[in-house]
Amino acid sequence: MFFKANSQLQSGTVYIIKMVLDCGTVIYKIGITARKFEDRLAEIVIDVFKHLRYIPRTTAKRFTSSTNYEHVETELLSMYKDKKYTWGFTFGGCTEFICDVDEEELLAEYDKRMKV
C-alpha cells in the first residue's frame, strides 16, 4: 500500500468492497486507506473501468476506522492468500482482491478483528 511505510499515521480505514463482474464472478477487495473511504472507493471503481470498460456492480460491505488497520488488513489477506484474484492488468491495490470465498465468513472475520 502507498502509505504503510509512513509510521506517523495514527489510524486508517479497513474496508471490504464486493464487486460482481459481468461474467458473474464475485470478487472482494480487502484494503486500507488514510483518505476518505468514499474517495478510495471511487478511485478503485475508476481504475477498474479504465481496463474493463464497464463498472462492475460494487458494494461497500465494511469500512471502519481503526488504529490497528494495518494488522487487520494483513491478517485478513493472509487468511485468504489462497483465494487471490488476479486481474489481467495492474492498478493500485490490484493485488488485494480475493474470490471464491464465503461472504458471511469473510465479514465475520472482519467483524471479529474490528470488534464490530
Image (tube, rainbow, N blue to C red):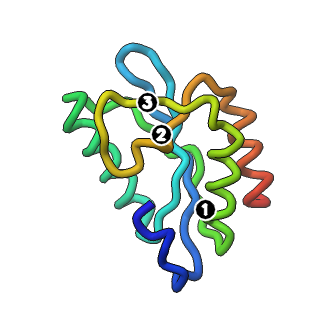
> Which of the two marks, 1 or 3, is nearer to us in this view?
3
Q: Are marks 1 and 2 in contact (CB under 8 Å)?
A: no
Find the distance from the CA under tag 2 to the CA under tag 3: 19 Å
| Residue 89 coordinates in the image, percent (x, y) | 29, 34
Q: Residues within 10 Å of mark 3 (few under 14, many from 20)?
A: few
From the image, tell me which residue sits under label 1. 64
SS for tag 1?
Answer: strand
* Amino acid, disc 1: Thr
* Amino acid, disc 3: Thr
The residue positioned 71% from the left and 41% from the top of the image is 79
Specify the quadrant of the image occupied by residue 35: bottom left
What numbered label is drawn on residue 45? none
The residue positioned 34% from the left and 47% from the top of the image is 44
Specify the quadrant of the image occupied by residue 37: bottom left
The quadrant of the image that shows the C terminus is bottom right
Find the distance from the CA under tag 1 to the CA under tag 3: 26 Å
